[in-house]
Image (tube, coloured by chain):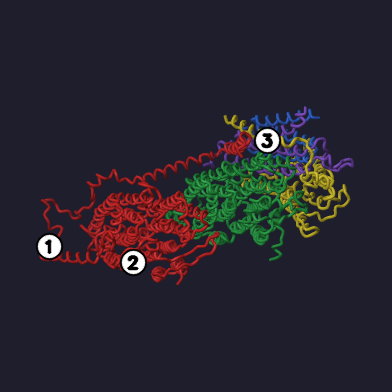
Amino acid sequence: MSLEILLAIAYGGAFLTYFSGKISQGLRDGAAVLLSLGTVLIVSSFYNVPAASVLYEGFLGLSLVLRMNSLAWFFAIAIVSFNALCVIYSLAYMKDRNEKDYYYFMLLLINAAMLTIVLSGDLVTFFIAWEIMSWATFLLISYNRNGALQAGIKYIVLSLIGSMCMLIGILSVYTSFNTLNISELSGQLTTASAGYKLFLLIIFSITFGIKNAVMPLHTWLPDAYTESPTPFSAVLSGMLTRMGVYGFLVILFGIVGIKSVLTLGSGFISYTKTMAWLGAITIVIPTFIAMLQNDAKKLLAWHGIGQGGYMILGIAFGTSLGMAGGIFHTLNHAIYIVLLFLSVGAVEYSTSGIRDLNSLGGLFKKMPIAFLGGFLGISGLIGVPLTNGFVSKWLIYKTLILENAPFLAFAALLGTWGTILSVYKFLHNLYLGQIPEKHKNIKKTPLAMQVPIVILSFAIILFGIMPGLPLKVINSINVAFGFSPLDVNLWGVVSEAGTLNMLNIFTALIVFGAIVWGIFRISRPATLTDQYDNYAAGAAIPKDKYHYTVEYYAPFYRMVKPFLKDIFDLLYQKVARANDFLCDNIRKIYTGYVGNYVMYIVFFMAFLIFIQLKWSVF
Amino acid sequence: MKKGVSIILLLILLWGVVAALSEMPFGKAKLEVAGHYTDYGKEDTGAANIVTSVVLGYRGFDTLGEVTVLFLACIGLAVVLSTLKKQGCGARQTPSLILNTGFRFLFPLILLFGTYVFMHGHLSPGGGFQGGAVIASGFVLMYLSVPKIKRLNHFVSTLFESVGGLIFLVIGLIGLKLGSQYFLNNFLPNGEFNTLLSAGIIPVIYIAIGFKVGSELSKIIDVLLEESE
Amino acid sequence: MNEIMNLNPVLLIAVPIGLAMLVPILGLMSSKIVKWVPVVGFLFNSVVSLAVLPRVLNQPIIVKIAGFAPPFGINLVAGPVGMFLAALIAVSGFLVAVYSLDYIHEGAAEKYHILFLLLLSGATGVVLTGDIFNLFVFFEILCISSYALVAYLGNRSGIEAAVKYLIQGAIGSSLLLIGIGLLYGQFGTLNMADLAQNITSFSEPSVFVPMILMVTGLGIEAAIFPLNAWLPDAHSSAPSSISAVLSGIAIEVGLYAVIRVVFTICHVTGSFFVFLVAIAVVTVLIGEMSAFGQKNIKRMLAYSSIGQIGLILFAFSLATEFGVSGGLFQMLSHTLGKVLLFLSAGYMIYRTGSMEISSFEGVGKKMPWTALFFTIGTLSIIGLPPFAGFSSKFLIIKAALAKGDLLYILLMGIVLLGTVIEGTYFFRVVQVIYFKESNNKTEPEGPPVSGLISMSVFAILVVLIGLFPNAILKILTTAASELLNNLEYIRSVLG
Amino acid sequence: MIIIVSVLIIIMLAAAVAACIFKDLLSATIASCMVSLIAAVLFFFLQAPDVAMAEASIGAALVTAVFVIAIRRTRRYEE
Amino acid sequence: MSFLQNYAYYTGAFGLILIGLFIMMTKRNYIKIIIGLSILETGVNLFLIAVGYISGGTAPIFSRSGITAEKMVDPVPQALVLTAIVIGVAVLGMALALAIRLHKHFGTLNLLEIREQRW
């Protein structure tokens, strides 16, 4: 099985799905599921099988190369798995929507494009796939109409800025080194001057920073996540955004090389420090903004930004521990954020489109699977032990401590506190508390939604207890980038800063849990009473919900609100307005009066003649 | 203000042109290409009028373009005015008797003169364009002096325009197959110099152009006048 | 096949003109066949030009009209540049003619077809001719037929636009003629190769002034800022098939003429290119920014053409082999993309009855194919892979970076900013087409087969050239060396 | 000879200026016709009889006729 | 006198060109602008013919036996001007036809008032 066939299946599958949808709905659904599962199988067959092949000889004098290595495999398997889960989920979620052919086509096309990105062995392939991913994503973000349109425009503008930067970067590499093959470049770039490397890093960082939503460049993300169809939000947050991380890995470690990166800058102002601090800012501020959101998806979206900061923080230091943390966190984040989006989607599906945290609640009994997903998801998000988030965060904290970066560590910790506060609100307002009257008889969660949620929940626990599974792959990535391998076993990591053994923690927690369970067991059992069988100081007992969850963190909100304005978004909007204004006024030079136009013509001529005759400029 | 700026800009332009003109004094001797035309034009094309030999011989392709432009103008004019609604007949003075009589007397003469001009284009000043214009001015006179508007015959004028142009082109294409195999190549014998039947294809083309230009220019006037009266 | 390959390139000009002159006679016989005449003519042209194209890559064909050797007679130079553009004109002309079969059904259809044939034969003449005055004549054919076609619909906007276009165009051609006169007075020749041989330095006033006059005169048709004020009006008021040709071909032919004057005849060097680059950047910015706020789709597309022309001029003014071949590539991709956009917009306008972008809501559902073609055109124009626009933009940026000068990198950054603006407004239109529901529930009705065929061929070409850019890269590099190396040009013409 | 030419040129330029100044478009047209006519005479002096003929018949006669028709169909005075 | 000898025709030609351009730049009436265009074209033609003149030349026609090729004026500009005149009349015809339509649509020929197509 070669890489070309994999891509052919991925792209061809997208088209096949689209056209089979013209024949019958069932055929299309079947095709989508089978093809996405098929790609999972094919990709997994590449485990530990490095491969390389030339896709296309001589595209504008370049050859487009594909290659499979541990890094590519790690990302590829994640991409196709999440995609498959989201496709399965979509079967139920998208049931009543229109234009499903289009939806599946775009979803699979984006999947194929992402696959191409991670498999690409040279920067042109990378760029082409990157662009296909960008515009296809735009077309899918806009799918929901209305508010989604604005989100789509925001996304595509930033994305275009990013790709233009990348194009400059790629082509400047090409003109300097006459090759774009990643493996060839890695050797050659060491000879480049520091200034050039810095230029390259900055220009690529803008691209990948936009995609990964690093703080000043994040503004497209909340809207885009919120407005896309939920399964696609999951894909978007799970892997698509993290293509930025992949890009950072490739450019920082694959092309420029970590040794060169670490030498850039001096003292406090260095490339890696700047990046780390941007990561820290990206952790703290969005997490607290997330706390104030009342839209479930928007809350998750802000967390998506915040968690991206951890990954940046992890890889910024360029140590094997940090790398492992960053890459592992990418995977973990994808698992729990996809899970969370899927469970929110389940709620949305059942309540026919309500995501407002203030008008939901008590869905725990009605949709236990979704609750399970939500609960495990937020646990992972917080980093509760026994969930996967704990391991990767542990690795990142360890890195920060080892690197003597107490402020950054504090920022990361602050982020976690904020996460706890905000996700508790999320969990409570969705699933706990009192169920509103109108949601008493909501739709059941269909099986196609339950399956992905259960699988992901299982994955959270699995990777939480046995982090060695993914860490082994990550270790080989580390080796490939030239870092020393970590000492990894199935249950955790052994490092100079301490040992992580999830088996011990697992056993301890089991014992502790058993004790707690026992205490509850022997104490008096709680009794259930009806809502109306209650004493309310003589007042009439309300018939409807009285367990209100609006203004969840009101005092806190009042306190921090002035500081948490999304100034960058405001700034961008100001820039956009200024641009509108400028554009509207600059075309006023076309006054509509021909005399002026003739004047322009004669002026152009006279100007040139004058400067030449007077000063002989040319 | 605007006038001032215009004048300044135009003066700068003038400055530039004067600078360029200093390299090309008035009345200086001909350069290589023009010298070649006057020296060998007679032999090359057989036309006594060197301007004609340039227009239809050396630079015949320009003339093809020129004919096309006129054809184009005719069509374009018709397009621009085609969708206009017919206007009611405006007040039109009856032309005076003198004009009317003069027209009857002059019209054949003008046509004859025009024909002469384009038939002798290779011998004397004039040619298809001038002859055609003379014919067209005859038609202008007709429009001025005839009380009831006589429209040009659409069929005939279309035929003249198209066939005139096509003759030009076909002669050119025949040249591609005959003789030295060049487009617009003079494949007919040059004949005796300075007689009517000389200069190969030139008189043929000029006759075609004469009819074409005459009918086209008349048609331009005709179309412009069309619904206004 | 051999027969066709040995056909004379002069037929590319003579046959359409002949057919145009034949049309009135055919019209007298039957009005049905008239509309097939342009199709036949440009099919012939496409076949001939594509067959001759490989031949000219090795050695340009010098066609001596009437058998007089240059510089004494007029000659056509069917070199790589000329034949490349002629083939482009012929193929696009053929497809647009197919499109017009059903699209043009009101007004004086017969005259439309004549004007269309003449417009493109004028364009072919401009790109093939080797004589500066002959260039002027064909340029006039191009311009006058454009004036008439802009006014073809005869409505308020069409007439107003035609009037403005005519005034500016007429000034342009007069300036061109003054320039030609000044050059003739000094060098006594009109042959471009001979002129190029005689001109030693472009910076002397006696050469510079005529060059500026010519550049200005031709630049009006090429829509270089600040000479482009006629363009948005004219392109938005013509029938869509004509807007397509004007935007896709006419302005590029104008730009070709400018480039010919600047590169071949005057052999400009050094700082004048910096000026041209600056003008190009301003053109890009003005074009894209003016398009940004447009509510009228055709005006938006027209302004976008200004931006694209700026990009092409930018590429040419880099004056390196990469740059010039990138510019030619961009010409190709702009022609394909913009014609596709105008054609698909044409039927969208026709079905919705309005040129306002907001009236296109729901078009994506009603006319899925047209909307798809529009989207493909959009993506290609913005320069996103895997469409043709990407390859050309790739080459241009590469060329700018290969200059290695910080100035060029900065200017290119500004050009790319223009691209971002362009992407924004184009994607907004795509959103309106696909993602807004319309209120009026009219029956979905796609374009007729002729329109679909021509649009789909354009779309396929856009994708194919995007996927296999190498197929034409050889033509482009040969063409670039023809433009850059004027000694070679002089040698091949004058022997 | 040169004196006659100079006088003609001065008259021609004066006619052109008059065409610029006149508010009555018909008068301006006649003035521009005069420019063309004098130009035709100048062509003749410049040994270009062909062009003189063309200018006289086309430039002076036909163009003026076209102008007059157009002015008749629109309006006579510049506003 | 020698100045007149050398520059009279050029002065006339460029005088017409500049006056024509001036009219086109400053006048608002469309027909006036076309008159300017016509003057501009006449000027250009005169300029071209003047370029081709040689001192004491004869017309380039072998009408009599005494005419030699050396003394003939340059025939090329004359050929060009013939073309230019015809092209000029074509453009003027189009322009005036458009004037008629413009007046039908807008009721005015003042271009300052005809500004629907802008921005």
> Which residue is pictured at 45% across the width and 72% down the height?
A1
Indicate the colour of chain B.
yellow
Residue carrying label 3:
B17
Q: Chain of mark 2?
A: A
* A167 lies above or below A28: above
Residue carrying label 2:
A472
In 3D space, how far apart are the residues under numbered discs 3 and 2 (Cα atoms)?
80 Å
Residue carrying label 1:
A527
Quick one: label 3, few (<14), some, or many (20+) residues within 10 Å?
many
The spot of residue A51 in percent (x, y) is: 45, 68
Indicate the colour of chain D.
blue
Type of amino acid at the residue the image marks with label 3: Val
Indicate the colour of chain A.
red
The spot of residue B114 in percent (x, y) is: 80, 44
The spot of residue A353 in percent (x, y) is: 32, 58
Closer-to-camera residue (C228/A479): A479
Type of amino acid at the residue the image marks with label 1: Thr
Q: Nearer the viewer, mark 2 or mark 1?
A: 2
In 3D space, how far apart are the residues under numbered discs 1 and 3 (Cα atoms)?
105 Å
* C355 lies above or below A30: above
Please count the marks in the image: 3
| Chain displayed in purple | E
Quick one: label 2, few (<14), some, or many (20+) residues within 10 Å?
some
Residue C358 seen by the camera: no
Q: Secondary structure at mark 3?
A: helix
